[in-house]
Image (spheres, rainbow, N blue to C red):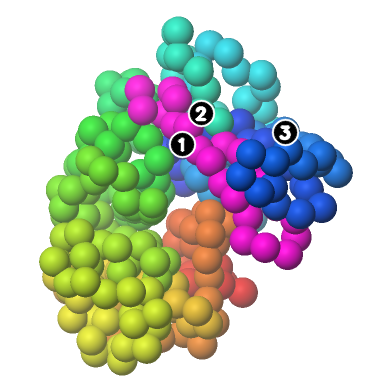
C-alpha cells in the first residue's frame, strides 16, 4: 500500500440518523420514517474525504470493545484503532425532519481515552506523513502531545478545535500551524480565551481588519475563519506561499469534508490559497 502522506487523528463515532415526519415535542414519541447507522465522527469524515480525493491518508482513533464494524475507508486509506477495553465506542445521534434544524446528541466514549503513547508508537505513519490534521473530538492531552510530536517531525499541523471542549487551552493553539474555525467556534474562542463577548452574527458583520486582529491574538500561525459566504485567511509570519497576510475568498468551506479536503490539498500545494480554493470548491 502507498505510504500515507496525510495523517488524521481524532474522534470516531458510530452515527445513527433518524428521519422523522416532524421533530418530537417533549415527552412525545414520533415514529421514524427511516433509520441509518454508519461509521462517523469528525476524524473519520475528514479522513474519508481526503482519501477519496486521491491523497494516501491514514487515520488514528480510539474505539471501544463493542465496535460493530470500523471499516469503509477506500483502498488508499489506512486506519489504526486503539481498542479500549470496557469502554463503549463513541456514539452520535441525529434526528431530522428535513425542515427544522437537526437535533444532535454525542457521547464521546472511547475517544476520551485516546492515548498519546499509542499515537507515538505508530512510527511508520508519523515518518511518512507530510501533513497532520487533528480534531479536538478526542482526549485533549493526546491531541496536544500529537501536535507537539508532529512539530518535532516538521509536519504541517492543521487543528480543528470544534466544538471547543472544556479542557481545550491555548497550548493547542500555540502548537498549531493552521487553525480552522467556523464563525460560531471563532466567536466562542474570542469569548473564552480573549474575554471578548461577541456573537457569530457580529463576527459576520465585522471587517477583515477587525477579524484579523482577533485571530492574531488567538494563534501565531494561520487562522481560517469560515463565515456565511466567504473564508477569511489571517497568516502569521509564514504566509505559506501566499502574496498577502490577510485576504478573503468569495466562497466558503465548512464541515469535516472541507477540512479533510484542505488538508489533502496542502500535501502537494506550495500555495495555501490554491489549496483553500480547491477545498472550498
In the image: residue 80, left or right of residue 150 = right
Q: Nearer the viewer, residue 44 or 149?
A: 44
Vertical position of residue 59 compared to residue 225: above or below: above
Q: Are marks 1 and 3 in contact (CB under 8 Å)?
A: no
Q: Which residue is mark 1?
A: 11
Rendering quarter of residue 220: bottom left
Q: Nearer the viewer, residue 134 or 93?
A: 93
Q: Are marks 1 and 2 in contact (CB under 8 Å)?
A: yes
Q: Which residue is mark 3?
A: 37
Q: What percent of the width, then of the height, locates residue 64?
A: 50, 17
The span from disc 1 to disc 3 (Cα, nearest Å) is 17 Å
Q: Which residue is mark 2?
A: 90
Q: Could one spot residue 161 in this view of the protein?
A: yes
In the image: residue 36, left or right of residue 66 = right
Of callouts 1 and 3, which one flags the residue occurring earlier in the amino acid sequence? 1
Residue shown at 77% from the left, 47% from the top: 19
Residue 107 drawn in magenta: yes
Of callouts 2 and 3, which one flags the residue occurring earlier in the amino acid sequence? 3
Amino acid at each position: 500500500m502507498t505510504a500515507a502522506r496525510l495523517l488524521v487523528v481524532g474522534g470516531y463515532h458510530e452515527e445513527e440518523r433518524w428521519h422523522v415526519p416532524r421533530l418530537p415535542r417533549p415527552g412525545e414519541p414520533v415514529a421514524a420514517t427511516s433509520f441509518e447507522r454508519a461509521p462517523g465522527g469528525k476524524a473519520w469524515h475528514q479522513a474519508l474525504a481526503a482519501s477519496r480525493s486521491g491523497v494516501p491518508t491514514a487515520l488514528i482513533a480510539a474505539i471501544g470493545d463493542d465496535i460493530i464494524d470500523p471499516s469503509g475507508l477506500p483502498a488508499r486509506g489506512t486506519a489504526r484503532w486503539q481498542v479500549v477495553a470496557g469502554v463503549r465506542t463513541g456514539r452520535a445521534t441525529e434526528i431530522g425532519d428535513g425542515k427544522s434544524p437537526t437535533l444532535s446528541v454525542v457521547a464521546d466514549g472511547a475517544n476520551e481515552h485516546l492515548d498519546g503513547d499509542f499515537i507515538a508508537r505508530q512510527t511508520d505513519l508519523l515518518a511518512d506523513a507530510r501533513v497532520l490534521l487533528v480534531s479536538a473530538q478526542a482526549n485533549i492531552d493526546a491531541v496536544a502531545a500529537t501536535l507537539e510530536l508532529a512539530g518535532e517531525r516538521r509536519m504541517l499541523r492543521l487543528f480543528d478545535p470544534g466544538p471547543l471542549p472544556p479542557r481545550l487551552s491555548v497550548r493547542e493553539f500555540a502548537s498549531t500551524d493552521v487553525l480552522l474555525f467556523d464563525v460560531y467556534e471563532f466567536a466562542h474562542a474570542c469569548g473564552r480565551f480573549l474575554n471578548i463577548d461577541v456573537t457569530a452574527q457580529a463576527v459576520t458583520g465585522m471587517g477583515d481588519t477587525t477579524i484579523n486582529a482577533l485571530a492574531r491574538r488567538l494563534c501565531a500561525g494561520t487562522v481560517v475563519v469560515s463565515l456565511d459566504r466567504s473564508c477569511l485567511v489571517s497568516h502569521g509570519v509564514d504566509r505559506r506561499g501566499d502574496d498577502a497576510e490577510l485576504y478573503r475568498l468569495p466562497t466558503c468551506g465548512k464541515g469535516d469534508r472541507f477540512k479533510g479536503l484542505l488538508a489533502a490539498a496542502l500535501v502537494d500545494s506550495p500555495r495555501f490559497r490554491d489549496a483553500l480554493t480547491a477545498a472550498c470548491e
